[in-house]
Image (tube, rainbow, N blue to C red):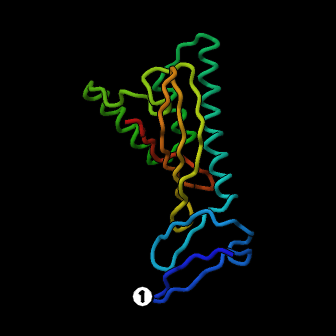
Amino acid sequence: MKYIMTLIGALLLVPVALSSELLGETVPYKGHVLDGPGMVYVMTPAAEKEILERVKEIYASLEAQIRGYEENAVETDGEAAVENRNEKYCTPSWVDLFNKVCDKEQRTDELCLDVDYWVMGQDVGDFSADGFKVESVTGDNLDHATVWLNLHNFGEETPVRLELVKEHGQWLIDNFINLRK
């Protein structure tokens, strides 16, 4: 059985067995995040599966929407499409930030968002997403996650890191980070 060492008090180290009694299920040790004194969080296969399913659902919906535009040769109102995706799949704080940026663009006539962060490009074509991997789950209630994926747009691959937050039982995107150098 694998053990994790956890700090209790100032200097006392106590091994904590990863067993069915501790986690409610038998879980192979995969990794952990220390979040404060005495706190050890383990990403269970069930938590990882839930997060991956949600992110794949989000990007499958995006891919289907884009295919619909391409197949029907329909021009889309890019900003309206992004706003709809934001409302459905992003945290309220992300939506608020996006709305503030759009307001600034209208007030100043200055372009603030030059790239659609959903596809990591100005335009979209031959779009897909793959390589989904949960990097970490953290927070007092295991309500923050980081997911890596690759976006393919016009033949270009862009590695992306998503920061997610679980709000009202639903995983929502709180940040998009383009990792292409």
User: In the figure, residue 103 lies in which quadrant?
Assistant: top left
Residue 66 at what x, y percent from top left?
Answer: 59, 22
Q: Secondary structure at mark 1?
A: loop
| Residue type, label 1 | Ala
Does residue 147 sit above or below 38 in this rendering? above
Q: Is residue 125 above or below residue 139?
A: above
Which residue carries the number 1 mark? Answer: 10
Q: Quadrant of the C terminus?
A: top left
Total count of labels: 1
Q: Is residue 125 above or below residue 169?
A: above
* 162 w.r.t. 99: above or below: below
Looking at the image, residue 164 sits to the left or right of residue 19; the answer is: left
The spot of residue 12 in percent (x, y) is 48, 89
What residue appears at the point 62 percent right and 62 percent down from the top-left corner? 30
Q: Is residue 137 left or right of residue 181?
A: right
Q: Position of residue 129 (x, y in %)?
A: 58, 33
* Residue at image location 60% in from the left, 15% down from the top: 70
* Residue that appears at 70% across and 58% down: 46
